[in-house]
Image (cartoon, rainbow, N blue to C red):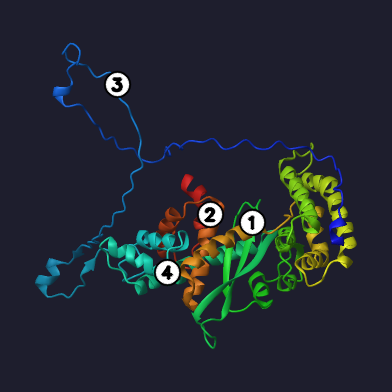
Amino acid sequence: DGEDDDVADLPDTGLPVVESKTGKKRGRKALPENLPRERVEYDLPDDQKACPCCAGQMHRMGETVTEQLHIEVKAKVLQNVRFKYACRHCDRTGISTPVVIAPMPAQPLPGSIATASTLAFALVHKYVDGTPLYRLAQAFERAGVPVSRGALGHWVIGSSEKHLSRIYDALKLRLRSQPLIHGDETTVQVLKEMDREAASTSYMWAYRSGQDSDEPIVLLDYQPGRGQIHPQAFLGHYHGIVMSDGYSAWRTLEGATHIGCMAHSRRRFVDALKARKKGGGPPEQALRFFEQLYRVERQARNEKPDKGETRDHCIRRFRQQHSVPILNALKAWLDDIAPKVLPDSKLGDAVSYTLNQWGYLTRYTEDGSMPIDNNLLERDIRIFATGRKSWLFSDTVDGAKASAVIYSLMLTCRACGVEPLAWLRHVLTELPQRPENVAIDDLLPFNFLKAAAA
């Protein structure tokens, strides 16, 4: 195989040698300090408190404490008692006056048996833990609370349409003002779409703010198709940086600066290596280039800026010194090998993709704020894809839209380091009290911890 002779030396850019990380410490982690403690005391019976040697009375000289994690899931019924008042004087004199009843706070789903806490419990189980509604209904049944799958579906859609979509819309506006947006899409099946077969493929379009954003946002947008109109409508006249793979729909955002995903290119060479009957060869050579590029990225993140230098300028300088020579060598090697590979082979596909996307793939070296790949968003999509393996499909379009909203909020909570159950309880309690024209900025996940600490 003549291709196997195409070996290129990686340029020496003076990249520091990084010592391998030490392994993680073994052993069980201590239980979190913030959990409440309850003492359970064990004492000797009185007849065992005598010394086994001299039969004298022993004294207590201390205690041994071990800790265990104890979890109880309890359901209870809240009886909302509203006192009623009437005027006896008016009753006696025949004057008709209304009975006055003490008001209750507005509920998230009026007429429903579910409190904000119950709704939060159900939503977290479905959208964080990946529990399908039929299994969630079974869990309620085991707890002695019969809740049908249909009722759970109404809770999901009602929570989204009445309240959580307000948070989603506010996050969407914030996302459009971000300097960098990651974009990608993944499939979803919706059984009852108008004028479409149940087996038709629909899409969740995914959008995410950059890794260094002060306002981490992850949004999914359900759409029946994969056309360019969807990112155009979602992002509007966006003029920031868009990180995406080579799919052309993203590149139709005319006002944006587009960068490509190096991980997509690398993945194609991994596939080419797997397709070989023997290891090594050009795919392995290409992967050595990528390994070096990612090594630069790991070190660039830890590089200290010079005096008066911004972090982005520092990363750009580091990339210009170390990444650009590697990329130049990779480009020369690809140009050399391209005529020698079969176009319809896995290797041919990898080489062709990388050369066709070269301008987008290498643009990240020009700006320290640009990422090398789209892995940040792909990790979020992986969480959605894992859940999809459990629930398989959405029954209706309304259900798919609700899933997009709630997954978005759960992924945004994850990106912000916010505990989703506590956040949902608070938001579903607070939003019903706020009219549409009242600000909700304090309820956005990245503001939640600040508001709670204030």
Asked whether the beta carbons under mark 3 and mark 1 sit within 8 Å of each other, the answer is: no
Q: Amino acid at mark 1?
A: Leu
| Residue drawn at point x = 60 percent, y = 58 percent | 379
As helix, strand or loop, the secondary structure at mark 2 comes to: helix
Distance, label 2 to label 4, CA atoms, is 20 Å
Q: Earlier in the sequence, mark 1 or mark 4?
A: 4
Residue picked out by circle 2: 414
Question: Residue 376 got which mark?
Answer: 1
Circle 3 crowding by C-alpha within 10 Å: few under 14, some 14–19, many from 20: few
Residue 65 percent across, percent down from the top left: 33, 30
* Viewer-nearest of discs 1 and 2: 1
**Where does the image place residue 432, in percent across and percent down from the top left?**
40, 65
Taking depth in this image into account, of 64 and 367 the one nearest to the observer is: 64
Q: Residues within 10 Å of mark 2 (few under 14, many from 20)?
A: some
Does 121 appear above or below 305?
A: below
Looking at the figure, which quarter contains the N terminus?
bottom right
Spatial CA distance of label 2 from label 3 is 43 Å
